[in-house]
Image (spheres, coloured by chain):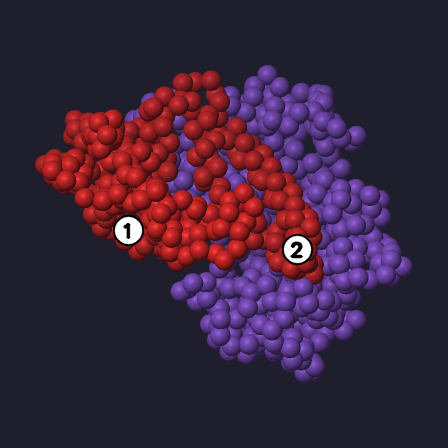
Amino acid sequence: MIRLREFSFTYSGADKPALNRINLTIEDGQFVLITGASGGGKSTLCRCCNGLVPHFYGGRISGRAEVQGMDIVAHPPKELATKVGMVFQDPENQLVTTDVEREIAFGLENLGYPRNLIARRIEEALDTAGIANLRFARNIELSGGEKQKVAIASVLALHPEILVLDEPTSELDPQSAEEVLRLLERLNDELGLTVILIEQRLDRVVHLVDRMLVMGGGEIIADGTPREVMGGDSQGLGIGLPPVIRLMRQLRGKELALNGLPLTVKDARLQLQKVLREVKTAGFAGGGAKAEPVLNVDKLWFSYGERAVLRNINLDIGRGEFIAVMGRNASGKTTLVKQFNGLLKPTKGRVRLGGVDTRKSSVASLSRRVGYVFQNPNDHLFADSVEDEIAFSLRNRGAGETEINKAVEQMLNEFELGRYRKSYPRNLSGGEKQRVALASVLVGQPEIIVLDEPTRGMDYVLKKKLINYLDDYRQRGKTVIMVSHDVETIAECAQRVVLLSEGRVVVEGNKREVLAKALLFSPQINRLAQALSGYGVADNTLTVSEMLEQIG
Amino acid sequence: MPELSYRDRDTVIHRLSPLVKLAWGGGLVVLSLIFNHPVYILILFLSIIPMVKLAGVGREWASTLKLALWLGLSIIVINALFSYHGDHVLLAAPFRLPVVGSPVITLEAIAFGAVMALKLAVIISVFSLINLTVHPDDIMAVLLKMRLPYKSVLVTSLSTRFAPCLVEDIERISDGYRTRGVQLDSGGWFNRIKNQGKISFALLSNSLDRAVQVAEAMEARAFGSGQKRVFYKDINISRTDAATLGVGLLPLAAGIAARVLGYGDYQYYPNLTSIGFGGWGWVMPAIILLLLAAVVPLAFIKRRVELD
């Protein structure tokens, strides 16, 4: 059991508490989801569970926190390690050794367990995590999902009673994330392990958990079953409800008498099938007007050494389009978009930007026309202050100070960064850094903006603001190209989708053609629409608003 | 390009105790440093080839040899251009420089450079062979067996483990810079240094973040628990291993003895002396060659003993 009473914690040097008078009891065997806006205290709360707070991260503490009857102030992480296993967000930076077997043995070796016991625990952990086939694999060769399973196995070997996971799926593709979550469900169901999971993508997990905590400003602002939390007034919680839940909430109070809040597409389908009458719909148009081409990819091949990563890609991208590039990890998405600004040059074939061959231009000159926002905002930040960071590109181009100042002011306002103008960019929070990175690229108003996984790990409020901004940017005649796994966001904002597999374009076209009726890449609402097509619901419906148009 | 890190294979060399391979490789490196005679150095180089062949890492070794070749050529050129010793002048510059006089290229300077390049090839080959055939954690275990402090060994092992991440970081940060319009490879030297400084600073900042994350993950798994640490995969030294270890160390012992007795030396300046040995002088290099090669049949014997 975890018990916090009036527990507060303030990081050393911070003026506001990261956790403010928390009262919380988590019973053994519960599956608890913690969600909420960035900087709300989720990670700090999780780090209290195994004593990293306050032993690893110093600070001021008040109140009392106990884990399995042990006071976290009196018991450091090394003593709590056999009670609480912790898995972190980044799959790479939590693996310490070079291969799977040694990784699982690491904690047991630290505890000085005898070799025969270590051998037995390794066997158990490999089987429980379902990774016996990876036993002798090298960590460097594992996929992100496999790395997370190894991390889980390495803490399971210590026989913890509680498993705490800080956004373990945020850096994984949908299939890997699904596998990790299935493993957690099994550990909770079959072994009775208490699971505490931080997650932003609620559609992935709400049906698995017993309890949902929403945190904001260092406090627990909602606590209950997922139905209680998401069925109540969720405005101001800073969480993005899954599309089926948003749909069903909208339908409540209308003619359709619905029974409780469905947490899955299946629940929603069963409820709607009972109450739905014949719907007359003409469906949604799939095509769109042909836009003036700005980027042309012609028979593009690209190889790293002997390994072909892109194979015969042909693509035309028009002015004012919003294009999503999707595909499994390592399918060639990032390699493709890096061709657009010349970071990578074709091995064969051509990429032309407004008729100019990228092979004949430098990245610096192409950067005036193509802005590129990397996954990790840290890769963008070099300057000593936020305003210098934003001004950097313009100054580098030799723009005048008046023009620079005007553009910087505009960006500071648009991205709500005014109060941080003199701050050192790398000291900001993750969400703030992401905004600085975006502002530093968009200040040059490039014709094309390429964003690589911009919504990964982003909280709902920030994601919504970003998507609104990008949509507005597109409407100003600019082209937006976004690499993403986030099907729900793509269904809302993209016009065209390019799906890659093994370096080839498997399918490319209007989002309805690509996302509707797809098995893995279809959004929740489309999966519901497909099941309800017998009632006349258009089977290419993608969003909540489109569904409401038909049955609302 | 072939991958140059350890990959588990079922060869007699991979199955040989890491202690033996490290003793053998360490011996080669020391001998390449203490001998000057071209034939001795050539013997050291040739003794690596059967090991490479038996380990099945020929392609990977060849790619490191390419690097050695370029470095070796630079050594030869630099030595030829800046070492003006030697009586056999091949080329003399028609001008004089203050202090050093008229620059000349001599046969002796080229020969000295060539042998230095061969020494470098031996050292690079040994590191490549060890890297390709010894599991990094086994290297750590061997170092611990030598009673080096665990924390220092772990830090070294972690640095190796995260080296590829550092390379990726440099690429990403440089890309980030280039996409903001900076031309990293052009401009004056001051600008270039300034740009590289910014990249280094970002790199340092990323590395510190990573260090914190790794430390956190280690603490969460009872690192420094106060218990006496157990090593799940300890290096056990069987009798056959002890015998092979002895054989692995023999070339080093014989080489040091030979050097003390005055063998293996060679004079490059002012004139190249004969590389012949005269009389029974060839016996010593032959002994060293035999001792270096002895590890190969012993590796087969070890495998045979294990199978029996």
Is disc 1 surrounded by few (<14), some (14 to 19) or many (20+) residues within 10 Å?
some
Contact between labelled residues 2 and 1, with CB atoms less than 8 Å apart:
no
Q: Earlier in the sequence, mark 1 or mark 2?
A: 1
Q: Nearer the viewer, residue A343 or A256?
A: A343
Position of residue A155 relative to residue A428, above or below, is above
The chain holding disc 1 is B
Whole-percent x and y of residue B36?
Answer: 30, 38
Q: Chain B hue?
A: red
Q: Nearer the viewer, residue A362 or A279?
A: A362
Disc 1 designates what residue?
Answer: B57
Q: Residue at x 37, y 46 (%)?
A: B86
Q: In terms of image quadrants, where is residue B228?
A: top left
Q: In terms of image quadrants, where is residue B39?
A: top left
Q: Nearer the viewer, residue B24 or A319?
A: B24
The chain holding disc 2 is B
Disc 2 designates what residue?
Answer: B177
Chain in purple on the image: A
Q: Nearer the viewer, residue A288 or B198?
A: B198
